[in-house]
Amino acid sequence: MIYALLVTPARAEQVRKAAIGHGEVVFDQAGTMDSFSIHNAFQSAARVAADVLVLDIDAAPGPDLVAAARCYRIARPHVRIIVLAPAREPGDPTVAGLVGLGIYDIVAAPIEADWEALVGKALVGPPATYAQAARWHVMPGPDGDEHVKERVIIEERPAGAVTIAVMGAAPGLGCTHTALAISAFLARQGYKVALVEDSQRFALDQF
């Protein structure tokens, strides 16, 4: 496996040992970065073909980290991202924002934990699913309660009556049969159907 690392100095050595023990590290940047630096770091990471990106949530301020991670997800949608979330609990807005991007591997533990062992376990384990990360996908509301973030889905649907016109360049091409077949199908699907013939030759009288 090929790994990219975006970590803080506090956990950099432990994460490196874990990654080197399970594969090859092709990108390694450690530091506490500002908005400009974290975007540059993600852009640099996107230039290498890694299988897994290990991301320390303390590497940059939350909103900047989420925004930069969104750009990385667009550039490298198939890279597995493992997030280190020391001393974080469900309701943390940064973790919730990352889960909202489809990042489900969240490694949460106390700051003084053995991060080499935790990262090593995550690297050899299967990718997490939303079911495992769902508890992180909450935001504290103004009343202190936790509220699940809602996703609004806009669907385009026809408004009013829909007209389907069936016409042919000459008589006898099967337009009447086609119109009848379409009408019958829509009626079986539960739609209200009105079949109207607009022709000087009233073919529907034959049925």
Image: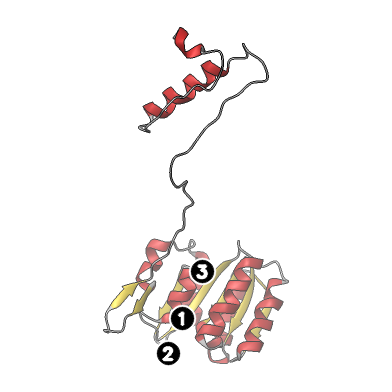
- Label 1 sits on a secondary structure element that is helix
Displayed quadrant of residue 147: bottom left
| Separation of marks 3 and 2 at Cα, in angstroms | 28 Å
Q: Residue at x 43, y 89 (%)?
A: 111
The residue lying furthest to the right in this view is: 47
Q: Which amino acid does label 2 sit on?
A: Glu
Q: If you read the primary sequence from the N terminus, does the residue marked by circle 3 or circle 1 appear first?
A: 1
Q: Which residue is drawn at 51% across and 69% down?
A: 101
Q: What residue type is labelled 1?
A: Thr
The circle on residue 112 is: 2
| Separation of marks 3 and 1 at Cα, in angstroms | 11 Å
Closest to the observer, 91 or 188: 188
- Label 2 sits on a secondary structure element that is loop
Horizontal relation, residue 31 to residue 127: left or right: right
Residue 193's place in the image compared with 6, above or below, is above
Q: Mark 1 points at which residue?
A: 94
Within 10 Å of disc 3 (Cα), the crowding (few <14, some 14-19, many 20+) is some
Q: If you read the primary sequence from the N terminus, does the residue marked by circle 3 or circle 2 appear first?
A: 3
Q: Which amino acid does label 3 sit on?
A: Leu
Q: Looking at the rendering, in which quadrant would you find the C terminus?
A: top left
Indicate which label's residue lies in the foreground, 3 or 2: 3
Q: Residue at x 35, y 32 (%)?
A: 190
Closest to the observer, 150 or 26: 150
Residue 176 place in picture, x, y as percent:
53, 17
Residue 4 place in picture, x, y as percent:
64, 74
Residue 105 place in picture, x, y as percent:
47, 69
| Separation of marks 2 and 1 at Cα, in angstroms | 21 Å
Within 10 Å of disc 2 (Cα), the crowding (few <14, some 14-19, many 20+) is few
Q: Mark 3 points at which residue?
A: 101
